[in-house]
Image: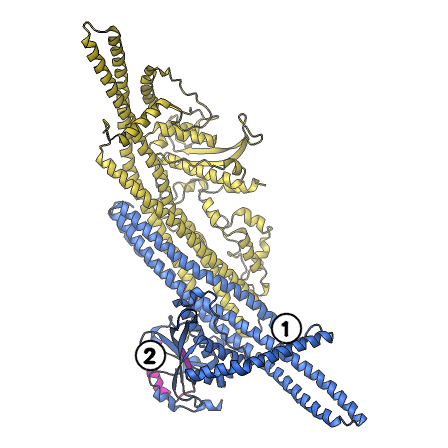
Chain colours: A blue, B yellow
Amino acid sequence: MSALGGGGGALRNASTALAISSTESFAGTPSCHTKRVRRPPGSFYWLHAVTPAPPLDTTTLKQLVFVSDYAESMIPPEIGPQKSSSQSPRSPSGAPFLSISVTDPVKLGNGVQAYISYRVITKTNLPEFQGPEKIVIRRYSDFVWLHDKLADKYKGIFIPPLPEKSAVEKFRFSAEFIEMRRQALDIFVNRIASHPELKQSEDLKTFLEEDEEAMERIRSFETGIFKKPADLLQMFKDVQTKVTDVVLGKEKPVEETDPEYEKLKHYIFGLEDHLTETQKQAVRLVKRHRELGQSLSEFGKAIKLLGACEGDSLGKVFAELGSKSELLSIKLQKEAHNLLMNFEEPLKDYVRCVQSIKDSFSHRANAFRLHCELTETTKLKEINLEKLNLMRSDKTREAEIEYRELKAESEEATRRFETIIKRMNEEIVRFQEQKTAEMGLAFHLFAKGQAKLANDIADAWRNVLTKIEAYSLSSGHD
Amino acid sequence: MMGPEIASGFDSPPEREEMESLALSDASASAYRSAMSSIPASISASSDGDPLLAPPPTLHFPISSSASGHGGNPATSTASSFLDPPSYADVVFSPFDSHNGHGGCGSGADNGSLLRSDSSPRSARAAKSDYIKISVSNPHKEQETANSLVPGGGTYFTYLITTRMRAGFAANGDGESEPVEFGVRRRFRDVVTLSDRLAEAYRGFFIPPRPDKSVVESQVLQKNEFVEQRRSALEKYLWRLAEHPVIGKSDEFRVFLQAKGKLPLPTTTDVASRMLDGAVRLPKQLFGEGAAAQVVPQEVVQPAKGGRDLLRIFKELKQAVTNEWGGVKPLLVEEDKEFLEKKEKMQDLEQQLSSASQQAEVLVNAQQSIGETMGEIGLAFIKLTKFETEEAVYSSQRIRAADTKNVATAAVKASRLYRELNAQTVKHLDTLHEHLGLMLAVNSAFSERTSALLTVQTLMSDLATLNTRVDKLEAASSKIFGGDRSRLHKIEELRETIRVTEDAKGCAIREYERIKENNRNELNRLDQERKDDFLSMLKGFVINQVAYSEKLANVWATVAEDTSNYVRGNS
């Protein structure tokens, strides 16, 4: 962490408003600094610099500001670039930050080979990075590489989840899918960049800074030569363990029986079920909004035609109702999109996060098994060594070396297992806090969107109502 | 088995049927309950009745289902309710358009239960008609006494038709000051008879179409929904007849509503059409068809025209073919330009009405679905809240559970509002369906006109033929000095026929003119009524949309406000 203090000078170059918001307004909780920067084509993105938040209590949690991109369409303009540029001079060398944005998805290649590439822009003042700004081109599989590397190296940490591969080929290049994936990838890298441990990963640096060819080389090098054999070896080992288990009569693999851990597992599995159900309903709600929009527009058209039959001024009232229906149809479609991006997607992300926690369960189980086995074997070796010592055998020296090696290995396994436990205990707190904030925002955007939609509907119809009343008066009806 | 359901169904107002289909299904209702009642009581926030659990039964949960579905244990649901009860006033049903001048015609007098007191546009005319109340109730299964081919299959239902008329409008017209009430039992067949009789007697009028006979009647007749569906359809039909300025006052209709015992209406022919039939029958007798016996009034329902006068039908068919294919200009053609234009306009209107009513149905379904899905989201969040609360270890989880609870409550409220809005939307957009139904009446009135014209045309071409024959005979007989006795006799005969046919033609033309007049008056009346109805429909639709949308906006705005602290840069 000490490295984070320096590098202030880098920011001065980045005077284009990258920046750091002052944190005073958050009751001194320096949890996060974010700024929005408007880019010329009109798309904008977030810059964030995050320091680990201190443990939060109930009251400060409500003030937690978190890093995510869900809200990009919902942000009020007053915290736009003007404000950030006016604030940045106040903290020219301010706190260390690392902010990444995934932008400009471009379709490359053709047919089956086609893929989407993204521009990954890194802005930082951290000294271990090459410079204040770096832009690389990455594709989805590069993100997968980063994810897998981290998952392999940081067992016990809940690695931020990646968006799924598109299940349906048809939607793979739809604008909506691309945008959703871009958003999800942006969240993915920023979560890594804001994670106290993950952000120091060499792999992240590689991912953010290596040029495309180097990236390609590294990936093929690893997958080609090292990764697969290692995997095979692991698989072989796993099978071996299982076989030994069966042979030795240990039908069930050793499992932790810590009641607290049991509870956590129970919680996570239950949570996954509930969230999956909720997310399913959210998908349907999006669909329903679209359908209502669709039918409202058709209804509007039919009403207009019907009004044309009536001719006179009543026909005009019909026409008014018809055009308002069509207008509202557009609003409903927009709200459907808003729901998809700001409500359904966060719920889906929630499910993914829970699944990533489940991944760490299996890492933990493996580590636990290894720890148990090695402890046991070490014990056996120790007994054996004592025996040999008593017998003053020639093999004593050899056995002792073997025992020491094994003991070291066992201790290493135990240490690794304990690291996982420690990490998971920290991670679960992080997870809960982060999700409370993220869901809070998702709820907010959901409610806000619904309220806006309802208000728009009310306004539009109120407008028609005045026309109807005017007609009633003019035609002598009450 | 069917007792209680039916009983509760028949005490309901006419729009009950729509409401029932809109209500939460039994299953989801109990799903809500089970989810809510199993939430720990320790965090119970409410002390009094929870509207989420016990919504107004007349509106959303059929009484029968809430009583039977929940084992009659309201104590548990109220005691252990978890969510803050949304303020009852927020969600409680209130029609937003009751102030539009038509609502509640005399509803205060009778608790509104059996009155057509909703604020649908038609009630405006209901208020003007002689009838205060028409209700169809109390279906009773009866055994067919004769003609049952299938043993045990010969059952039918009779319905109790209760009518209350405005003072001084009763059939006897003896000027009573109190409203008069009648109660008769009728079966569907009687309604068919009534509608056939009306069709005959009021040619050229737009007679509201009667409910369809069910094709698969015998198979579904036992089913309660079928009986209830038919009951409410009959009630609606009778109301429409009552609201018609001419039909509502007709003897046929009054007899149907008031005569005790068996329906005394004969199944065919009445004064008006007898005149024409008689006239048409006369030449037929002369053609040697023999005296046409009055068709025996049978209990059997038969199409008004089928089999009554085969010869006439053939002749008119021939005339129609001649008109169409012969290229011969008939002696009398439809010349009323205004009418022809109007007819075309009505055809266009029918088409647009049909598509609008179709789209209205799609819209209503979509609105219903969004309400249901909103409810399911709410339910999912309620479950999630419960789960998080039970499993909570960290304070962040409790905060999240509280937020989730807020959203769940809002979603359930929104779902309710959507459903109520939809019930109102259905009620108002039903005007489209109703007018589409009326187009059927318009079409049949127009075809009455066409067929009357055809009768005139047939008689005219008959006359022409007869005249030609007389001319020929005269020419032939004039060649023979002193005349040909038999020819002269024949000429006399033909002259007699011509005279009778002339009479018939006169009758037919008068009938045709009468129908034309009726058509014209009815078109004007319908145009006015449709304008009124459409205006009320638009108003009702829009008012409810505004009011419910405002409520929805409030519900969500509260949640948005409560969660605004999660927004970045919120200072």
Are dots 1 and 2 on a single chain?
A: yes
x and y percentages locating residue A212 in the rendered image: 42, 82
- Callout 1: helix, strand or loop? helix
Q: Quadrant of residue A98?
A: bottom left
Q: Specify the segment rendered in magenta.
A: A79-102
Judge left or right: residue B191 versus residue B349. right
Give yes or no for residue A88 being in the magenta stretch.
yes
**Vertical order, A19 against B262 (above or below):** below
Q: Which residue is mark 2?
A: A81
Badge 2 crowding class, 10 Å Cα cut-off, few under 14, some 14 to 19, many 20 or more, is: some
Sooner in the amino-acid sequence: mark 1 or mark 2: 2
**Vertical order, B293 against B524 (above or below):** above
Q: CA distance from mark 1 to mark 2?
A: 48 Å
Q: Residue at left 52%, top 60%?
A: B379
Judge left or right: residue B198 versus residue A431. left
- Camera sees residue B108: yes
Q: Quadrant of residue B30?
A: bottom right
Badge 1 crowding class, 10 Å Cα cut-off, few under 14, some 14 to 19, many 20 or more, is: few
Of the residues shown, which amino acid type is indicated by label 2? Answer: Pro
Q: Which residue is mark 1?
A: A262
- Camera sees residue B122: no
Q: Quadrant of residue A85?
A: bottom left
